[in-house]
Amino acid sequence: MEIILLGPGCPNCITLEKNTIAALEELNITANVQKEQDIVKIMSYGIMRTPGIVINGKVVLSGRLPSMSELKELLRTHCNS
């Protein structure tokens, strides 16, 4: 699974990165997690508000920090896509 976390490095973006790594560990899911902080590249995904999550090339969330349970559900749902 390929995960790209979109955000310029704001507090919510940092929290999203920490939560994503923790959720992947808890779910025992292996993923390549990358951060994208370049605003032009972030906008190329069609989002205008960060943080954002891209899983396997698809934007699955943007503009807010998900709860840990919502994040886990997103990861489970897109694990095999």
Image (cartoon, helix red, strand yellow):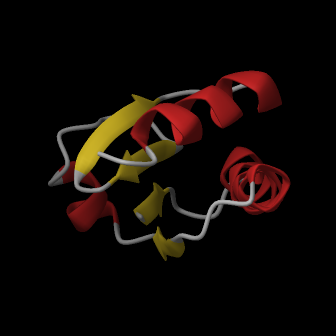
Q: Which residue is at the front of the view, 38 or 52?
A: 52
- Look at the image and tell me whether residue 15 can be seen: yes
* Whether residue 42 is situated above or below residue 32 in the rendered picture: above
What is the tally of numbered marks visible in this picture?
A: 0
Q: Which residue is at the front of the view, 62 or 69?
A: 69
Q: Which residue is at the front of the view, 11 or 69?
A: 69
Where does the N terminus fall, quadrant-wise? bottom left
Residue 67: x percent and y percent?
A: 77, 24
In this rendering, position of residue 33 left or right of residue 81: right
Where does the C terminus fall, quadrant-wise? top left
Please tell me which residue is depicted at 66% across the width and 53% down the height of the picture: 13
Please tell me which residue is depicted at 53% across the width and 72% down the height of the picture: 33
In this rendering, position of residue 54 left or right of residue 32: left
Residue 74: x percent and y percent?
A: 53, 32
* Whether residue 1 is situated above or below residue 73 in the rendered picture: below
- Look at the image and tell me whether residue 65 can be seen: no
Residue 72: x percent and y percent?
A: 69, 35
Residue 3: x percent and y percent?
A: 44, 62
* Whether residue 25 is situated above or below residue 68 in the rendered picture: below
Please tell me which residue is depicted at 77% across the width and 24% down the height of the picture: 69
In this rendering, position of residue 68 left or right of residue 63: right
In this rendering, position of residue 10 left or right of residue 80: right
